[in-house]
Amino acid sequence: MRNKRKNAARLALLNAAFILLCLVTLVPVLYALSISFSGQGTALSGSLSFLPKDPTLENYRAILFDKPFLRWLKNSLILSAGTIALAMLCAVPMAYAASRWRFAGRRGMLRLLLVLNAFPQVLSMFALFRVLRLTNTLNTHGGLVVIYAGSMCVFAIWNMKGYFDTIPKEIEEASKIDGAGDLQMIVRIVLPLARPAIIVTCVMVLITVWNEYLFATTFLLDSQSYSLAGGLYQLQSNDYSRNWSVFTAASMLASLPLLLIFFKIQKYMVSGLTAGGVKE
Amino acid sequence: MKQKLRWKPWLYCVPALLLILIVIAFPIVYTGWISLTNMNLYHWADYQVIGLDNYVRALFKFDSGFLSALATTLVWTVFNMVIQIGAGFFIALGLNAPGLKLSRVYKTLLMVPWAVPAYISILLWRVGMFNTEFGILNKFLSVLGFDKVDFLASNAIAFISCMALNLWMALPFMISTIDGALQSVDTSLYESATLDGTGFWVRTWSITVPAVRPIIAPAAVMTTFITFKQFDIIYLLTQQRGYMTGATLNTVITYAHQNAFASNNYGLSSAVSMLLFVVIILFSILTNRSLRED
């Protein structure tokens, strides 16, 4: 009996601790959410309330119609789709080859890719700027897509290879007897089987592109062609004090799709993220 | 047939390798080349090869700032990782406490920071938390009757602010990884230990920790690299163009970036980049070896 009561007290304490922890964790998000629904003056007022005083959609109207938000959204979608297509088109065949065939130089090449990938992307910016200028692709979405795809390629190869390794060869051999060619077999048999890995890889690429602001604002010179991340970055860097409440509204809108996708695929994320990293 | 198979795998690799050659390999080679020259604002087009001078300057002249940036980076990485793994472990342990009915709800709520895009989190914290006029921390302080604090103004407090934000952003991944590992621990081990009458701490230390360690290790190593290479937090909080906050906090990577894009000292910046590259490679070889022995 006493043990039971002690246990209940312990659980109550644990619950209290977790409620406090969740509240502290959510403060920045809730605060921004409340600002996004508040009128102009509230952000500066001394009140600590998390409920907007006179709720208004003005900030959302301002970001959607006074700023090129929808244009940025369109650009983000174009950049994401282009990057996913290019990265997967390059990575899947290589991942397949590295998983299925043992050829000279295979191991060394896979290792080398990991080594090259250790170079921090931020520090390549200057060299990449020169590449883009040389090929006349500065200020184009195409140039940015190539760069994004290249920087995600090694991750995609390792991630997909790890999954292909787990698909038994016998399944493919059966379809070979049916007379299907290599390419046909990959498209019809291997890719459908590898769907979970493909989804995780695509989502990781999507998240990276969706969140990238530094290359976007450096390589695109015209703010009309910015992605969402670039546009939001610029919004807060010119005079954040005037734009703050509009910025919070923009943040909520830009985060929402990712939030939904994230909670949809979260169970794959942990295993997917660590699978490629240190194996082999 | 045999002949065909020799070049076929490489054919499959060509598109990816071409892409990697342009986007990843070329910048490294180019950076290596620039690191041997005196390219800077005054020698923009007429730069010359000056050998290893940039490396000498970075490594042996203390006023270059590289060594202090390296020290900051190491302190940053160690502090963040220790707190992250420690806090992550205890939070995950709490989530797995028997009888905690709402644990799923707590877990979902605790994952929110992970789902918010990183740059948005940082920019929201920059104004919404740390700012002297708009920040909720300062509003809180003034309600309590304290003076306002500029959380990004000097190095020590900016370091702590950046670390708080990094923990906020990174803990969900750690909690989720450790939580997954904890659920894979064989519960019969606990039962026999409880029968033996061992206390919570002894049980945790001698059963739980050894059981989850090999599962957590790869994630911890990966996070260590990410923490070491962290750029966005320090850059966006303290050194945005036109909004330098007064803190001169630099990790190696923001140091290299600042030298290239703020002071246009491309030679030195490239040398630092190459040094950083070597450090990361050495570190990954080391950790890879110890992971395999585990």
Image: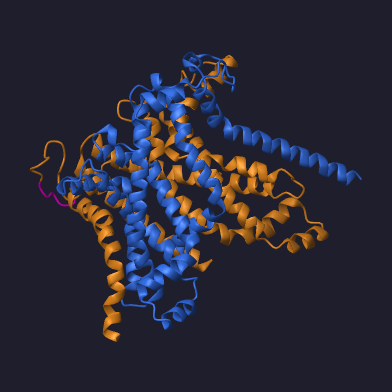
Percent x, y for residue A271? Answer: 53, 58
Tell me if A19 is positioned left or right of A169 in this view. right
- Specify the quadrant that holds the N terminus of chain B: bottom left
Task: Using the image as rendered, state which of residue A16 and residue A214 is in the foreground.
Answer: A214
Q: Residue at 78% x, 41% y: name it.
A: A10
Q: Residue at 48% x, 64% y: name it.
A: B290
Q: Colour of chain A?
A: blue
In which quadrant of the rendered view does residue A241 lie? top left
In which quadrant of the rendered view does residue B279 lie? bottom left
Task: Using the image as rendered, state which of residue B107 and residue B31 is in the foreground.
Answer: B107
Percent x, y for residue A139? Answer: 22, 40
Percent x, y for residue A87? Answer: 34, 56
* Main secondary structure of the magenta stretch: loop
Task: Using the image as rendered, state which of residue B285 and residue A228 is in the foreground.
Answer: A228
- Check if residue B229 falls in the magenta segment: no
In this picture, is A231 found above or below A239? below
Magenta region, residue range: B48-52
Q: Residue at 51% x, 41% y: name it.
A: A259
Q: Residue at 64% x, 48% y: name it.
A: B92
Tell me if A95 is positioned left or right of B268 in this view. right
Task: Using the image as rendered, state which of residue B124 and residue B145 is in the foreground.
Answer: B124
Percent x, y for residue B9? Answer: 31, 74
Q: Which chain identifier belongs to the orange chain?
A: B
In this picture, is B4 found above or below B242? below
Q: How is the image coloured?
A: by chain
| Residue A61 makes an appearance in the image | yes
- Specify the quadrant that holds the C terminus of chain B: bottom right
